[in-house]
């Protein structure tokens, strides 16, 4: 059966690739985001990709403005006639060097990636549980698995988010809420434009394919591309002293 999916962050990168794959297989998608012009363009693009003609709606929702979360979800509910799946790919990134020297952007990044994403998810939790359950799929990062020199602050925001998502899954899967935490490695998007590429760099479309499969199966934690599951198994076992010695 086709899903009714709300996507926060579908205007770029991983979220856009994911929304395209969902629309192309016939799922109904409603976009949430902060830039109305971009949202309108992306909604028209999704409409054209659908196997059968149907309008794709969009609503303004800025992760820096939590007062807009409930109204945005209510608008998505009205447009879709209820929804069963919510995907959050929206997030901020900056290099450690920039964050270390820009306290205001650090505050914004920590707020958007952790505090307000959690508040948004809490709104979704209440909505889905009131309707017997559904799927909440949120993009965190492999950067949240260990504290590391190059991503001290960004990694901390994702570590908090991953911990929240794991707790949510333990607490509410029995009641029908399937929580999916996506942990991508390096993905070629506007977020990573100009950064040196580490091994296993991926395209957003590859990540999207892995995420769509995880949504269908309800997989609680998914590394994307899947090779990162192996890499992180090793990195999780590295003693702190070794990490310090090799400057990792
Ligand atoms: N790229 C990577 O290597 C990588 C690796 C691991 C994890 N991730 C995570 O994957 C997710 C998607 O990243 P990406 O690479 O696809 O990034 P991206 O291309 O920069 O896209 C980020 C998306 O977030 C939206 N966004 C940013 N701030 C927002 C706000 N305040 N309110 C609402 N929407 C907002 C952007 O909307 P606008 O169009 O309005 O800018 C855009 O749609 C992020 O959570 C990121 O941390 C990325």
Image (cartoon, rainbow, N blue to C red):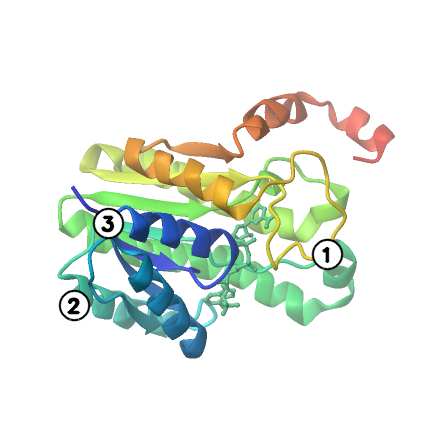
Is 144 displayed left or right of 53 in the figure?
A: right
The residue sitting at 15% across, 58% down in the picture is 82
Rendering quarter of residue 40: bottom left
Q: Position of residue 174 (x, y in %)?
A: 22, 32
Q: Position of residue 147 (x, y in %)?
A: 68, 39
User: Which residue is under mark 3?
Assistant: 26
Question: In the image, which is nearer the foreground, mark 2 or mark 3?
Answer: 3
Mark 3 and mark 1: Cα distance apart in space: 38 Å
Pointers 2 and 1 in contact (C-beta within 8 Å)? no
Q: Is residue 25 above or below residue 8?
A: above
Is 212 displayed left or right of 141 in the figure?
A: left
The residue sitting at 28% across, 43% down in the picture is 135
Mark 2 and mark 1: Cα distance apart in space: 39 Å
Q: Earlier in the sequence, mark 2 or mark 1?
A: 2
Q: Is residue 214 above or below residue 234?
A: below
Helix, strand or loop at mark 1: loop
Mark 2 and mark 3: Cα distance apart in space: 19 Å
User: Which residue is under mark 2?
Assistant: 78
Q: Position of residue 152 (x, y in %)?
A: 70, 48
Q: Is mark 1 within 8 Å of ligand 1?
A: no
User: Which residue is under mark 1?
Assistant: 95
Pointers 2 and 3 in contact (C-beta within 8 Å)? no
Rendering quarter of residue 78: bottom left
Q: Residue furthest right?
A: 245
Q: Nearer the viewer, residue 41 or 175?
A: 41
How many tags in the picture?
3
Q: Is mark 3 within 8 Å of ligand 1?
A: no
Helix, strand or loop at mark 2: helix
């Amino acid at each position: 059966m086709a899903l009714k999916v709300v996507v926060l962050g579908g205007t770029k990168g991983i979220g856009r690739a994911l929304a395209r794959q969902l629309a192309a297989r016939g799922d109904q998608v409603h976009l949430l985001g902060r830039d109305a012009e971009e949202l309108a363009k992306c909604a028209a693009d999704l409409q054209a990709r659908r196997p059968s003609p149907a309008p794709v709606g969009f609503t303004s929702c800025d992760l820096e403005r939590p007062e807009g979360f409930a109204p945005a979800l209510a608008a998505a509910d009205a447009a879709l006639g209820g929804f069963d799946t919510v995907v959050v790919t929206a997030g901020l990134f900056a290099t450690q060097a920039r964050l270390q020297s820009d306290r205001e952007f650090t505050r914004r990044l920590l707020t958007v990636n952790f505090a307000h994403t959690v508040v948004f998810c809490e709104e979704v939790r209440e909505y889905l549980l009131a309707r017997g359950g559904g799927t909440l799929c949120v993009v965190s990062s492999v950067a949240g698995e260990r504290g590391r020199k190059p991503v001290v602050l960004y990694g901390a925001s994702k570590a908090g988010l991953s911990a929240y998502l794991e707790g949510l899954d333990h607490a509410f899967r029995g009641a029908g809420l399937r929580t999916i935490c996506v942990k991508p490695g390096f993905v070629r998007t506007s977020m990573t434009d100009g950064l040196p590429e580490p091994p296993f760099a991926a395209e957003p479309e590859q990540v999207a394919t892995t995420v769509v499969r995880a949504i269908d199966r309800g997989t609680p934690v998914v590394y994307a591309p899947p090779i990162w599951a192996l890499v992180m198994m090793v990195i999780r076992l590295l003693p702190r002293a070794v990490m310090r010695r090799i400057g990792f």
